Amino acid sequence: MISGFWVVVPAAGVGRRMGADRPKQYLPLLGRPLLSLTLRNILGWPGLAGVVVALSDRDSDFSYLSESKDPRVHRVTGGAERADSVLAALDFLAAREAPETPVLVHDAARPCVALEDIEKLLRAEPVALLAQPASDTVKLSRKDESGPSVDRTLDRGSIWLAQTPQRAPLGLLHACLRRALAQGAEVTDEASALEFCGHSPRLVPGRSDNIKVTHPPDIVLAETILRLRYAPTEDNR
Ligand SMILES: Nc1ccn([C@@H]2O[C@H](COP(=O)(O)OP(=O)(O)OP(=O)(O)O)[C@@H](O)[C@H]2O)c(=O)n1
Ligand SMILES: C[C@](O)(CO)[C@H](O)COP(=O)(O)O
């Protein structure tokens, strides 16, 4: 399993779909801000060299998180889109670390990722991502005046739902992301920038409880996952 990897955490979003009174990364989960839980999770990963968190230029809350005081944690100003925030963090790293340095990009909005999945990703090929094979039937929609309806059913055997972390060597990811954005590609995850440059990232099956907190019901779901994950078991009461 590799060591000396860096983690980039895009955390500069506004949480529009959450519709809360603050950016969702600062909403409380089990009494702590979502971002704090995600960073605590990351800071426990074996072999971690450091973390670069991309924050909004209006973020005045990060410095109050205890995790922001960890010497391994660095901050940069994010951008208009998630990919811009990731690029800002990669710009920071490229000035300090070697191009072959392994980088994992992990959404601040995914606090529940399990260490077993991180270890699987760290043992995988250098260009890889956690993803969940589709377990529901997958429909492609068409739009008409009454709203979405089914266009056709897709073969779910080849459908995977991308998660994070997504992994690549620093120099490769930095170059591919810059090129994809410069050429106007739609980049919603790191793998799509790597694909744009001709790579085929390895899909590493991830747990279904590595949810991205996006809509209001996801808060309670994430709390439930974390409670079950960290509940004292009979043998460690
Ligand atoms: N300009 C942006 C937009 C998003 N993100 C981060 O990317 C992750 C995944 O994005 P998403 O779940 O879409 O978060 P938001 O963009 O905040 O949500 P929404 O699209 O509902 O506004 C989040 O941790 C978010 O903070 C970011 O760093 N910079
Ligand atoms: C990166 C990601 O989490 C993979 O599924 C997803 O693309 C993020 O999308 P968002 O709209 O920025 O939340």
Image (cartoon, grey):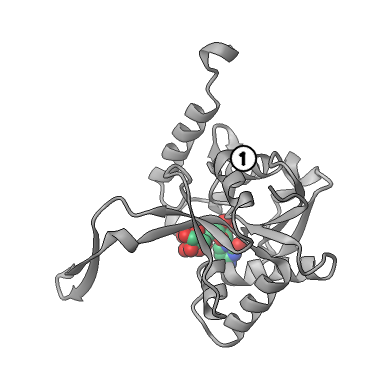
User: For the residue marked with disc 1, what is the amino acid?
Assistant: Leu
Residue 167 placement, left or right of 69? left
How far from the left and from the top, in percent, is residue 121?
59, 51
Q: Which residue is mark 1?
A: 37
Question: Secondary structure under badge 1?
Answer: helix
| Image-quadrant location for residue 139 | bottom left
Residue 148 placement, left or right of 79? left
How far from the left and from the top, in percent, is residue 60?
71, 54
How far from the left and from the top, in percent, is residue 129?
54, 58
- Residue at point 33%, 54% (across, down): 134
| Image-quadrant location for residue 221 | top left
Given residues 61 and 109, the one toward you in this image is 109
Q: Compared to 144, does 48 lie above or below?
A: above
Residue 14 visible in the picture: no
Residue 153 visible in the picture: yes
Q: Compared to 157, does 80 lie above or below?
A: below
In the image, farthest residue toward the bottom = 183
Given residues 37 and 117, the one toward you in this image is 117
Given residues 77 and 164, the one toward you in this image is 164
- Residue at point 61%, 40% (across, down): 37
